[in-house]
Structure formats: structure tokens, C-alpha cells
Amino acid sequence: MDGTAPQHIESYYATSAGPIRSWPQLDRDERCEVAVIGGGLTGVSTALNLVESGVDVVLLEAERVGWGASGRNGGQAQTGFGGEIEDLEKLVDSETARALWNMTVRGLDIITERCRRHRIDCDLKQGYLLAAAKARNMAAHAEWVERAARVYGYTQFQLLDRDAVRREVASERYHGGILDTGSLHLHPLKYCLGLAEAAQAAGARLYEASRVERVTCDSIPTIHLAQGVIRADRLVLACNAFPAPDAKEIGRRIIPVGTFICATEPMDESRAQTLIPHDIAVCDDRHVLDYFRLSADRRMLFGGRESVRNGAPANLEQSIRRRMLRVFPQLGDVAIDAVWGGQIALTRNRFPDIGRLGPDIYYAHGFSGHGLALSGVVGEILAAAIKGDQRGLDVFQRIPHRAFPGGSALRTPLAWLGLFWLKVKDLL
Ligand SMILES: Cc1cc2nc3c(=O)[nH]c(=O)nc-3n(C[C@H](O)[C@H](O)[C@H](O)COP(=O)(O)OP(=O)(O)OC[C@H]3O[C@@H](n4cnc5c(N)ncnc54)[C@H](O)[C@@H]3O)c2cc1C
């Protein structure tokens, strides 16, 4: 590709990923068994699973592989969903809720297995803390730890009181929390690129700078790009927060919400260790939450702040810095080296929306901020469904999804009001 080729946005991840390989732009018509639109974790995972089971796959990415949320995120791969399990239990029967929970645990196993099998060096570490921002949240956390073991068979949660949390995070802000020793954190761009390399090595054809403009479906799906046309027996839409071409019906079920991260300058080992002694990932339990962890080179990667407007909010660096100093006032002298953001795709109920649009088109989006672990299991499920085993897909399709209200003109203002209300609830 020439000098006008798309690039990854500036972020700590892009500068620390090492040499980032590029894939060619599609420049001719092609035929394949499965075409995947979107080169994030969902698309790449689906392509990898398919190609490993002998399917001929073409993956089309408008920008660069990992350019979207997958290469920018907080790097926290945890059990569970964006929505609470007690809300899931109101939407589906108890057996389905258990199957869905188990899939989130499977999502973590997939990360570990993939890193080992494909030798992906992505700074993988274990441990995640859900920190209680209010003392009164602790009762619900205690109940969930007990129910997770009894009902869901998950025994890797430990309930921490205020003092125990203080031993995990050098902050006075938290009243306790749940330590999940099964959850992980990692460098997401390295991970996504590693999966893409593995897919290519197994025979998938990957194209970057190849934006799909239109999809038509006569006898088979036909995918139209400026540079060529792909005919495929099956199509997977893995565009997440970006509008999938010719799929308005599912587009209305998600809202893109911006979330933002900063990376501080590197700290020396002893200072970093005093902040998060066991090097776990941390997220608080508010609606508009803070999430943070240390990078492999001991920077604080601190995320938070949400926005439904297009583009970054004004004074982004100052506002993220303010949030970080509220948690870690002792970081006042530490400079911020990079600030970036991206969009998560939120569904109304905060559970992912995975399904089919007709017999030949599959889609997955709406991970609601929890796609790192879920995209792996969804890739497995979509690949299995395409190969004829619908069981996993059936389970996800039992989650009911509705469009956001308001039509195209009112959706963003209404989402802004919703977000504002959540911020108010956080203050109560
Ligand atoms: C700042 C931030 C922090 C986050 N933190 C976490 C976290 O800590 N833990 C967690 O689990 N999740 C987190 N998330 C969410 C997580 O990153 C996503 O759920 C996950 O990456 C979704 O992967 P995806 O492949 O579905 O989407 P994406 O990675 O967004 O990929 C979609 C791709 O489709 C491409 N595309 C779109 N339209 C077209 C087209 N017409 N033609 C060709 N290509 C197209 C886009 O260019 C893009 O690369 C975070 C997200 C953000 C933005």
C-alpha cells in the first residue's frame, strides 16, 4: 500500500506493538466460501476458526487489522457481560443463563489457548478486581460471589474487604470488591495481530484498506468494494460499533459510545509495584466507570469517561488525568504520554447481539464493553454455526434485543440523556 494507506490511531498500543505488518488491499474480484467484514477480534477470531476447520475465508478490513476497538481497548478480559447476571436471568431461563455464563469463562480459556498455540506474546497476565465505589454495593457483591459458586459453579471469585482491596490497589477510593483470579489482561493490539497472523498462516486471505460499500444477496451474498467484488457462500458481519453495510435492522439495536484511555510515562519498578502490587486489572462498579492496569513497561493505562458525541471531548487529557488523580493522587508528578479513545457498541440490555440475517448472513456486535473475551467464543460459535452446528448460536439468540428508541435523528440525544442519568445515579 502507498503512503496514503490507513494507519492505526496514535496510542500506546500502536507504538509498543513492534513492527506492525500490513496486508494488501483487495484489487480484484474473488470467490470464497466465507467472507468476513471487519478485522477486529470478532472478525479475525471467526476467520481463524473457519480456516482451521478447512473453510476458504476472505477477511475484509476497511482500515487496518485491529484498527477499531480491538486494538485500542483497556485490555481487560473478564468473566461476564456488560449487563448484570441478575438482569440476564430475567431475560432467559436459568439453563440458558448458565450456558451463557460458561461461554464467558470459555472466552478466557480461548485467549490462553490461542496465545500458547500461536506463540502470541501479548503481555498476558492474570487477575481482575471489580472495586466497590460505594460501601453499600458490597452486599450485592457478597451475594454474587456466593451465587456464582453455588449456581454457576464459578469458584475463582474472592470477596475482598476494604483492607484487602487496599493491598491490591494503593487507593483510598474503594470499599471492597471482588477479585477474579480467572480473568486476564493483555496488550489487545498485539493479541489481535497475533490472531490475524495465525489466520493468514492457516490460509485465510486478509485484506486491509478494503472497505465494503454494499452487500447484495441474490443467490449468494455479493460484497461490493471500490476495488472489486467478492462472491461468498456465507457472509459474517463483524463491524461492531461501525454500521455494517446494508444491515440497518441490526444497526438500530446498538449505540456507539466513545470511551477514552491514557498511558502515563513509564514508572520505575518499585513505584509501579506500590500502585498495583499483584499487577492485576481493576475496574470500578459504577455505570460510567474507571478501568486501569499497568502496562508491561510499567505505565498506568487509565480509562474512563464516556461520550455519545462523535469525536473526542474537549479537554480530554485533563479530564482523564483528573479521574486518574481521584484514584491515585500520588501520580500528580507523572506525565501522560498518550491519550486515545474508541467506540464500544452498546445494546439496550448490555448483552451481545449475535445472530443471522437470513440463511447466509451472520452477525455479531454489541459486546457493550466486554468484547475481549467474548469475541473469541463468538468466533468459535459463528464458525461452528456456518459449519452446521447451531447450538452455541441458538443459546445467544435466546437473548431478546430491541432497537434503541428515537429514529436516526433522536437516537443520539436520547442516548446522551441516558448517559447523563447514569452519571447522576453514580453520584447518588
Ligand atoms: C477505549 C476502549 C476500551 C475498551 N476496553 C475493553 C476492555 O477492557 N475489555 C473488553 O472486554 N472490552 C473492551 N472494549 C470493547 C472491545 O474492544 C470490543 O468489544 C471488541 O474489540 C469488539 O471487537 P470487534 O472485532 O467486534 O470490533 P472492532 O474491533 O471495532 O472491529 C470492527 C472492524 O470492522 C471494520 N469495519 C467496519 N465497517 C467496515 C466495512 N464497511 N468494511 C470493512 N471493514 C469494516 C472496522 O474498521 C473495524 O476494524 C473497549 C473498547 C474501547 C473502544
Image: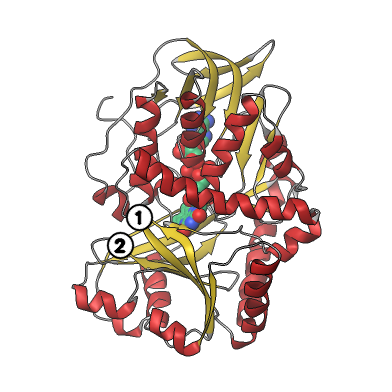
Q: Is residue 159 above or below residue 4?
A: below
Under mark 1, the amino acid is Leu
Can you identify the residue that label 1 sits on? Answer: 124
Helix, strand or loop for disc 1:
loop
Q: Position of residue 126 (x, y in %)?
A: 40, 62
From the image, tell me which residue sits under label 2: 295
Of badges 1 and 2, nearer the viewer stands 1
Disc 1 residue crowd, few under 14, some 14–19, many 20+, Cα 10 Å: some
Picture residue at 50% right of the left edge, 31% below the top: 49
Total of numbered circles in the picture?
Answer: 2
Depth check: give the residue in front, 50 or 102: 102
Mark 1 vs mark 2: which is more N-terminal?
1
Residue found at the far left of this picture: 268
Quadrant position of residue 163: bottom left
**Where is 202 relative to 319, above or below?**
above
CA gap, disc 1 to disc 2? 10 Å
